[in-house]
Structures are given as C-alpha cells and as structure tokens.
Image (spheres, rainbow, N blue to C red):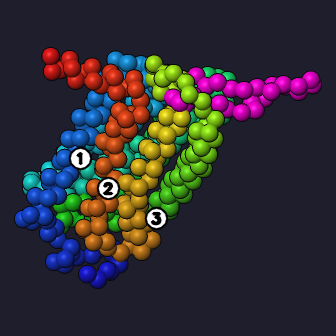
Amino acid sequence: MTTSTLDASTSLDGDDIDSWEGSGKFFRSLATNMVAILSIALNTLSLLVLRRSPTCFGETTKLIIIAMSIMDLSTGVQIILMENLSTWSRLPDVWSGYCKLAYPSMAFIQLSSTMFVVTLSIDRLIIITRPLRYPLIVTKTKLKLVLLLCLIPPSIVAYAVRGSYFFTKTRYCRMYLIASEYPLMFLVSILFLIAILITTYVNAKLFLIASRMKKQIAPAPEVSKGNIPSISVHFSTSVGHSKRVDKVKGQPGDLKALRTVLIITMALYIGWFPFFVRVVHNFVTLQKSSRIFEFFGFFAGYNCSWFNPVVYLLMNTSFRREALLIFKRQLS
C-alpha cells in the first residue's frame, strides 16, 4: 500500500474503504468485546472492593485508584458501544457526526486515565521520600483539585480532534489532523510529552528506591491491612543540625506498593506505544497508516483498561481478600 498526503478534499480509493469483512470482521468484534467485558467486570469489582474495604490503600491514594477505575470502566463501556456500532450497525453510514462524537470521547477517557497514572506515580514518590510531611503535602482537598486539573489537557485534546478531518467512508473513524488544528495540537503534544518525561523520571526514582528497599528489608510479619503501611524512617541528628531523613527502611508492603506503581506505569507505556507511534506518524507526515496497524494500536492500548485491577489482586492482600469475599457472597 502506498501512502499519500491527506487533506479535506481527499477521496477514498478502494484501499481506504473499510474492508473488515468475513473472518476479519468476526475476529475484530470478538477481540474488542472480550477486552470490553474484562474491563467492565474487573473495574466494577475494583470499585466494589474500594467501597467495602477502604483500608486497601491510603485514604488519599484511594481517590486516585477510584478515578483510574472509573476511567477504565468507561473505556470498557466505550469499546462495547463504539466497536459494535462500527462493526454491526449502519449508524456510521447514516450519521455524519458519529466519528466526531466517538473519537473525542475515546481521547478524553484514555488521556484522563494516563494523567491519573502520572498523579499516582508522584503520590507514591512523595509518600516514600517525604513520609512525615505526606499528610500535609497530600490532602484530600488538594488531591481532588489535582484530579480535576488533570482533566483539562484531555478536554482540550477532545475538543481539538472534534474538528479534525475524519474519513467519512470508513466506519472505524480513522482520524487525520487538518492544518488548522496543528498549532493547538502541537502545544498539547508538548504538554503531554512533558507529562511523560515527568512520569519517566518519577518512576526511575521509584525503581531506584525499590531496589534499595529490597536490600534493606528484613524479614517481618505480613502486614494485615493494605499494601501501603506506614513507613519506618531512620533519623540522624547532631548538635546544631535539624532532623533529616537519612535512610528509608521500608517494610514488605512498601516495596509491593512501589512495584504496583511501576508495573502499572510500564504496562501503560507498553500498551499505548503502538498507538503513540501511529499518532506521531499521522501528525508529522499526514500520511496514512494501515488499518491493521491502526487496530493493533487501539487494541493494545485498550488492554490497559483491565490490567490495573489484576495488578491490585496480585499485589494487594487486602484487595484480594475483599474480592474473594464478594465472590463468595455472590455464589452463596
């Protein structure tokens, strides 16, 4: 397939028209619906556990986890609606505004979830490096404000892509930016690049801290509640000097908390990397990418929506215990 520059007057040739037919159409529908069902089921479970067992995470950290779960649950709902309408209905053919609604909503949900992961990483860094000041630095009121601010960049992106050029003869909303949207999208791209760099820096520090904690942790009884217990800190004092943190000596629960954040962040990076490559390609060159690669980019990213609850189940004893209790109540 050759690539060509697109503009608003581009007409679609046979290669551009949606060709998901037969077994390919069935496979796409099956794969996306499985991801959607997993996302809805696991994130609903996550919200139920957080409601019934507030001690699974710290009081403030729980707010971030709830926000992430809501966005991931929304991803599952959006996948079911958008993919099934695109695959099996005539709505994309008869309603010209379908893609202008579906694509911005997807952008808002996915980018909001990404911003919440950035917030979670910074939250973990503060609680590990500033354990005594953490209750003053991170309060519920401040965190709610931060979470609201995290919604601003995704809202700008959703508004920007709403006016972008969409293929009108393909029901899967293949989006390419028109020239008039370049300045705004370039600015937003810079902001998200900064967010990615901050997240990478924070998680690199968390990785180094986790490595040191692994060497320092001595055998200790299992923490009964939550995977984020209080952190024991060694202080060194001397005459004429104020107290300072000399060394962080974590407990096994602290190390699990750091590993949880690192795993979630790495999964986010890996899952959305193909989509990021595709967007950069379209943004810089205004050239077409194959529909197979476009689907793979979306599909890999969508899988991040059900992965987080699985990490909580594996890494958090209290979360896993409460989840099992919920299953037992439903079965009894």
Front-most of 234 and 33? Answer: 234
Q: Residues within 10 Å of mark 2 (few under 14, many from 20)?
A: some
Q: CA distance from mark 3 to mark 1?
A: 33 Å
User: Residue 80 sits in which quadrant?
Assistant: top left
Instruction: Tell me if I can see residue 127 in this picture.
Output: no
Taking 90 as reference, is 320 above or below it? Answer: above
Q: Main secondary structure of the magenta part?
A: strand
**Residue occupying the point 35% across, 47% down:** 304
Front-most of 322 and 221? Answer: 221
**Looking at numbered disc 3 in the image, what kind of residue is underneath it?**
Tyr
Q: Are marks 3 and 1 in contact (CB under 8 Å)?
A: no
Instruction: Tell me if I can see residue 50 in this picture.
Output: yes
- Residue 300 is labelled as 2
Q: Is 225 on the left-hand or right-hand side of 128?
A: left
Q: Secondary structure at mark 2?
A: helix
- Residue 35 is labelled as 1
- Residue 246 is labelled as none
Which is nearer the N-term, disc 3 or disc 2? 3
Q: Secondary structure at mark 1?
A: helix
Q: Is 227 on the left-hand or right-hand side of 16?
A: right
**Residue occupying the point 17% across, 58% down:** 28
**Residue occupying the point 71% across, 33% down:** 247
Instruction: Indicate whether residue 247 is drawn in magenta.
Output: yes
Look at mark 3 in the image and give the residue it sits on: 182
**Looking at numbered disc 1 in the image, what kind of residue is underneath it?**
Val
Which is nearer the N-term, disc 3 or disc 1? 1
Q: Residues within 10 Å of mark 1 (few under 14, many from 20)?
A: many
Q: Residues within 10 Å of mark 3 (few under 14, many from 20)?
A: some
Give percent across and percent down for residue 199: 55, 48
